[in-house]
Image (tube, grey):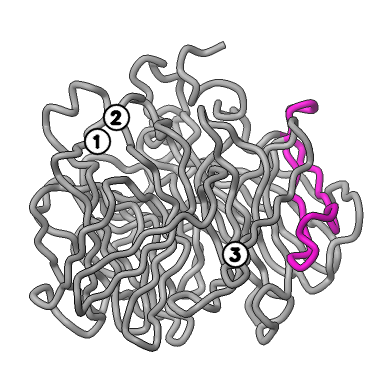
Amino acid sequence: MASNPYLDGNFGPVSEELTSVDLRVTGTIPRELDGRLLRIGPNPVTPPDPKTYHWFLGNGMVHGLRLRGGRAEWYRNRYVRDDEVTAAKGWPVTPGPRHGMGSIANTNVIAHAGKTWAIVEAGGLPVELTSELETVTYSNFEGTLPGSFTAHPKRDPDTGELHAVVYFPGWEYLQYLVVGTDARVRKTVNVPVPGKPMVHDCAITERYVVLLDLPVTFKPENLEKGFPYLWDPEYGARVGLLPRNGDAAQVRWLDVPLCYVFHPLNAYETATGQVVLDVCRHPRMFATDPNGPNVGRPTLDRWVLDPSSGKVSADTISDLGHEFPRHDERRIGKMIRYGYTGGLADHLGIGPIYKHDLVKGTTERHDEGAGRMFLEPVFVPRAPDADEDDGWILAYVYDAPSNKSDVVILNAQDFTAGPVATIHLPQRVPFGFHGNWVPTEG
């Protein structure tokens, strides 16, 4: 038993890179699912000091499942070959530029411009991967990326461009970027902020980029405590509305309840010009646990922001404990009816997943028992023109009795029922951060 919970049980790393083909399946994989379910998280390449190890700082490991023709063709996992990994393994150094103090990429894995990217925030550059998850190179998008990138770019479903809000400890501003479909940055706006906040995510609407300026901030003295970003309640909490076609002087700042938000579910504008922002709201963050995000149960909340009056209303959609929110990403920045979250109870309690009907105000729960612990749910539409919620939920699941993991496929419209299919993986997939479904092109 490790003294650090982020190194214990399924938080702990796996040591082998595996490739397994023709996986065992219970049930029937829908033939419409043709693509890769990717996932990434921290996986320290050498044993860290449990007293100082922070969950966010482990070396990246990416996992992938290839589905095609009703079959699970392969599962594989690979280290993202950062400088620590290549040194520890004696592998060749990964080519490409570097930015900031570290080279780890461990937080999200996306597809853009026909390539697969492992990404991180606060200084690291995107790392290009092959379709089979081998590391290719670090990238600054052909020299167009001014500095850092983010773990959470938002893809505009109408243009295919990525909208990103970036931070870095050396900056006195947040940086809004637009990355074109050619993977080149075409727009940069620097927005001054009074401190150096940790800005994990953002949201977009038809007219705005939604900025989160919240009380987890960088201070040099924090480094002595093991993690440079800590709870700073005197900083305050606010949300900025930056016109997508505007500049920093046009940001409208609105105060919100003191809290921390890693992840919005979505944002959209009403007919009367208000901005509706649904978030997973943590009461505090990095206030008592120096090693990870273990400070109270996060709730799913709705903030309605009125840029004309400056008023904000706040309501709780569900207080059951929610993180890793997802929805039908064909509707990013538009009104949605359905959202999905991973369960996150007190004391890092990981278990079921939830479906939220935001119109009816109801919440459904998919639970396969105490030994089945779900990672982030990902929605995949049945077809490109399918209705919202007409598709599947895919999720990696840790099975404690076997100490291995599965991928489950649920019918999104029959959420509480048993899986349509369960794909059995050859090893466990540690609790990590984010992933995505990448459909086969063409």
Q: Is residue 61 above or below residue 311?
A: above
Q: Is residue 202 above or below residue 308?
A: above
| Closer mark to the observer between disc 1 and disc 3 | 3
| Closer mark to the observer between disc 2 and disc 3 | 3
**Residue 232: quadrant of the picture:** top left
> Which residue is labeled 2 in the image?
287
State the image coordinates of residue 309 (x, y, percent, origin top left).
19, 75
> Which residue is labeled 1 in the image?
231
State the image coordinates of residue 25 (x, y, percent, origin top left).
88, 50
- Confirm whether the magenta stretch covers residue 275: no
Q: Secondary structure at mark 3?
A: loop
Q: Given contact means CB atoms under 8 Å apart, are the residues at marks 2 and 3 in contact?
A: no
Q: Given contact means CB atoms under 8 Å apart, are the residues at marks 1 and 2 in contact?
A: yes
Q: How many marks?
A: 3
Cα separation between marks 1 and 2? 5 Å
Which of the marked residues, 1 or 2, is nearer the chain's N terminus? 1
| Label disc, if present, on residue 361 of the rendered structure | 3
- Confirm whether the magenta stretch covers residue 419: yes
Residues rendered magenta in the picture: 399-427
* Disc 1: CA contacts within 10 A as few (<14), some (14-19) or many (>=20): some
